[in-house]
Image (spheres, rainbow, N blue to C red):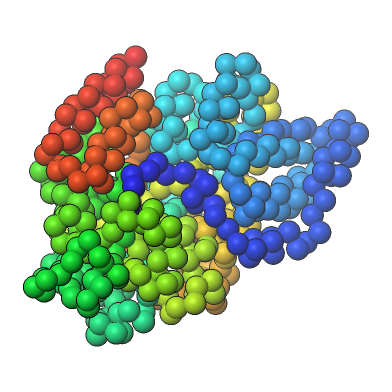
Amino acid sequence: MAAKKLSRRDFLKMSGASAALMASGLNLQSMLRAAPANQDVTKIVFGGWGATAEDNGVQAAIKQFMIENPNIAVEWQLTPDAGNYMQQLLTNFAAGTAPDASFITSDRYETLRASGQLMDITDRLKADPQLSQPNYFFEPQETNRCADANGHWHGIGSTWVAHHAYFNQDLFDKAGIKPPGFKDDEIWDWDTFITNAKQLTVDANGKHPDDSGFDPENIQQFAVDWGLWWMPIAAAIYSNGGEFVNKDGLIAIDSPEAMEAMQNLVDLIYKHHVAPRSATMSDLGMTNTQMVDNGRLAMAIDGSWALSWMNPSMVKVPLGTGAIPKMKKPAALMQAHFHSIISSTQHPEEAWQWLKFLASPFYTLSFMKIGLWLPSQTAQVTPDGLKEWVTKGIHPDNYVDFVTEYIPKYGVAIRIPNGYIEADTSFITPAFQALAAGKSVEEVIPDAVKQANEIIKAAQSG
């Protein structure tokens, strides 16, 4: 699969299921028009991106928030694409027209914090009787992504997302292979994964990769699609005992463990012939979801957000989910965008009340129910909490194991350093693209990391 940057457009592909969020007869515009007539009402602007699901969810949250806080009116400024929104936000910073609060992509959070654009919310967070509870968020993951080196918070994670496997149960049954699950004894090790992947890969003559006469140029059924972009690559690196970012805030994917993990992924395509090249998928004109649904792909390693469109109610084949294969240990990278208050706001207290609400179950549950988000609050994975969002027809039967056992034990949250955007655009993403085209890890990664870290060091010292 072609290397790509993590975009919220990919996160937010949604079906008509999201329309349910608007079933309450929302009439935000009339509420906002009426609000200024009351001199005691403070208006704040909230910016972000997303498709229908995100738009509907935010508007439903605003409606409830304004019922609970009639003295605060929230104006929602929506941009469809995360990249366009973040670029516009930078322009607004320079022009002095930034919103009061905003979505912030995880790769820009530290850069904007370091430049003083995000308000320090530490004291407010510590004083809040709900959010300050030690067991409110998943820890230490939430602190790992939110707190800077001095323990100061400048935002709260919106949710968690992580990669796992989606599989076509019919193809596994046909091959006589038991699919992976999320419990410790159900997670495939790498050798088991390669062995099973070869059995799940079939050419036009019905041969498997180790069979004499196997034709790698005419594969009719692939075993796995594992994207070669930073998030699924990072999951493999941590599984092999490496790091994507080290304790000094530098890119660390040139370590022996990281390079071995990345070469393992490249080998799926060019050595073992169990995964499609990006060109193959382009030629077929299908996404990995369509390939799974059409029997051309047994298993897709994709983000948990993909469950909102790759779920049992939206595909015609029996669909299952399980953990990604482990190299040395299980691991999945956890990420998501942040909610932050912009430091230039003239209404910090009102913006904080809104930020708190975005970390409430009311807001998060709507996205969890449609398969877009994972829990970020511990109460949401209790027996009673699970009943509030696990949805029949959306979440497979074993999905509870993912959020109650796998993620708490094996989820890895990282803080992306200041300067990463330029370093990634100039060197890291091009290196991943070279891997997807068949270059070896040794050929491209060490030099790319060296040059990327020069940019990061300059940003950190500045």
Q: Position of residue 134 (x, y in %)?
A: 44, 51
Looking at the image, residue 82 sits to the left or right of residue 225; the answer is right
Quarter of the image holding residue 258? top left
Which quadrant of the view contains residue 387? bottom right
**Left or right: 230 in relation to 372:** left
Counting from the top left corner in percent of width and height, residue 85 is at 57, 33
Horizontal side of 30 relative to 206 (left or right) equals right
What x and y, as percent, mark residue 229? 32, 45
Q: Position of residue 440 (x, y in %)?
A: 14, 43
Image quadrant where one finds the C terminus: top left
Query: Is residue 331 in view?
Result: yes
Image point (45%, 20%), residue name: 115
Looking at the image, which is closer to me, 63 or 148? 63
Which residue is drawn at the image coordinates 62% and 16% (left, top)?
A: 95
Left or right position of 289 against 43: left
Residue nearest the viewer, comparing 290 with 419: 290
Residue 25 sits above or below residue 204 on the image:
above
For this rendering, which residue is in front, 294 or 289?
294
Q: Which residue is pictured at 30% across the width and 70% down the height?
A: 220
- Relative to the observer, which residue lies in front, 293 or 349? 293
Q: Give the residue displayed 24% in from the left and 21% down from the top.
A: 454
